Structure formats: structure tokens, C-alpha cells
Amino acid sequence: MGRIADALKRAQLERARHTMAGGVALEEAPDSRFAGMPAGADPRDSLVAASFTSTPPLPLRTPPEPSAAPMAINPPPRPAFTAALAPIPREDIHAEVLAFHDPASPITEKYRSVRTRLLTSNPGGSTRVYSITSAASGEGKTITSANLGFSLAELRHLRVAIVDLNFRNRGLSRLFKCDKQPGIADVLRGEKTLAEVCAPMPRPNLHFIGAGDCGISGPSDLLSGGRVAEVFREIGERFHYTLVDTPPISAFADIGLIAPLCHYALIVIRMNKTPEPLLRRCVKLLQANHIAIAGSILTGYTEETMSCGENQDYYLGGM
């Protein structure tokens, strides 16, 4: 098995040895290839994240180990920013965004565990832009982006943005019922400013930037245009943490254009759905393009799916 499958096996062993009410007590894996396996959540079940430390980094500062320095309680402030769009109403936030609708749920607490992992890997409080991707569609990356964004925004000293950069599907925009509004596509064409396509969320320090309409320009043309680096630079200046929902790695080449503009990629993997050979190819593709992988988030994690017989193996297969 590859690293992902090994991580699943280790998760089962650790879960058996270290359980607690409402979730799993996670420890550092003894294998040096893993930097620990924090817990996260999918709105329909549980979720586990595993960090890989052997990925070639981008030419960006690699975050120190969590124990290297205390976490920044008050990260550097960001310039004043006023969103021009009307706030997204509470009732337009999809019911599956449990980090907003049910903050006391065990699943929301798992997303907070993923949030803590991201924060402790960035003790200096530097700007972080994460591309949230998956090997194939239907893995749960859009719901994960929304829930993780709301979890980060619980920390009121952080300014957080969620960006829909999946022009073909516009899942996040539909999730928040604002797929008809202008978005980042309009900014990349030079027709709007970032503030003009930014919508405040029910939490005051959380903002959403929709996909917008590509128009006659294709997604690849927009993402390879001259304005994309400038737009991402402004996003980094305005927000402490930005989560970018991207298309699946195997379906489109967009991630190869988007991820280098981000600090790290987070791969969402669905238990008993993501084929392991496909996942291996996608990880190699990211590594070949020198895209640093911060970790993986396993969705579809339940007591049933993590149980295996004596002669069985974890099989991430079946589309």
C-alpha cells in the first residue's frame, strides 16, 4: 500500500488505542513520513487528516514544526477592507455547513481539530492560502472548504476568505446561493475589483468570493492571464487564511495553474470511493509540479468503513 493506505491503517490502530468521547485522540505517527493525523469532518460522517512531510516544497517558507515556536495569538493586522456586495443571509448558508448551523456537533469539533493543525503549523501567523482539491469529483472538497472556513472564522482575530475557483461547477457559489453574482472571473478580466466581488458572511471576519461567469473566456485562459498573480497577491494581503475550492486534479488541468499561486494544497479523499491508483497519480502530478501538499483530509470516515477483517485491506476504490 502507499502512504495514504498506510495512514488509514495507522489511523485504525491509533483509534483502537486512543479513543475518547465524540472522536479520536490522535498522536504523532512513529513513521517519520507522517507529521501526525489530526481529525476533521464531513457533514455526513467523520473525517481524518494526515500530513505528508516528504513532499518537495514550493519556493516559499516551509512552516516550522508545531513545537518550534508558540502560536501567534495576534497575527499581523491586514489593511482595512470593505466588501461591496450585500451580506449573504443566514438562511442562504446550506444546511450541510454544520460548522455554522451546528457549532456544538461532534463533526464541527473535528473540523476545529483540522483548524488547529493548520494554525500550529503556522506559529508566526503568516498569510496562508490553501487550495482544496481532490483526485475526482464527489469527494466532499466543496463542503470541506465551507466548513473549514467557518471553523477558522470562529477565531475573531483572523480575517478569512473562501474562494470559489471551480469555474465549471461553481459548487461553493451554489452552496451559498450566489452563483448569479459577479465573482473572481470578473476580477481576472479586469472588469471588477476584489472588493466589488467580495460578499460578507454571517460571521463578520469571514468573506466569500464567488466564481462569477467566465463569459467567452475559458477557465484556462483566465487562470493563465496576466492578472491572476496580482489578484492572489491582493488576496494574501487582505486575509490571514484563504481557502480556494478548485476542480478535481484528474478531470482538469486547472489545479496546475491554481496551486502554484497558493502556499499549500489540501487533498480531500473519500473513503471507499477514491481509487488508490488514481490518488497516487494525482499526488505524483502535484509533486512533479513542485506543489507542496500540506496534508490530506479523509471523508467518509465511520466506524464501519474503518473496520476490516483479519485478511482484508483498506481499499479506496469504486467510482
Image (spheres, rainbow, N blue to C red):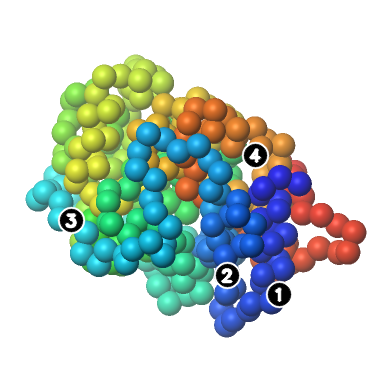
Alpha-carbon distance for marks 2 and 1? 11 Å
In terms of secondary structure, where does tag 1 sit? helix
Left or right placement of residue 69 versus residue 168 in this view: left
Residue 1 pos. (x, y %)? 76, 46
Residue at x 71% of width, y 53% of height: 6
- Which residue matches tag 1? 16
Alpha-carbon distance for marks 3 and 4? 37 Å
Q: First in sequence: mark 2 or mark 1? A: 1
Please rate how many residues cluster around mark 2, counting C-alpha atoms within 10 Å: few if below 14, some from 14 to 19, many from 20.
Answer: some
102 to 6, vertically: above or below: below
Q: Quadrant of residue 172?
A: top left
Residue at x 15% of width, y 55% of height: 77
Q: Give the number of the disc on residue 279.
A: 4
Quadrant of the frame with the C terminus = top right
Q: Amino acid at mark 1?
A: Ala
- Which residue matches tag 2? 26
Q: Amino acid at mark 3?
A: Pro
In terms of secondary structure, where does tag 4 sit? helix
Left or right placement of residue 80 versus residue 121 in this view: left
Extreme residue toward the bottom, this view: 21
- Which residue matches tag 3? 76
Q: First in sequence: mark 2 or mark 4? A: 2
Extreme residue toward the left, this view: 80
Residue 192 pos. (x, y %)? 17, 30
Extreme residue toward the front, this view: 68
Please rate how many residues cluster around mark 3, counting C-alpha atoms within 10 Å: few if below 14, some from 14 to 19, many from 20.
Answer: some
Q: First in sequence: mark 3 or mark 1? A: 1
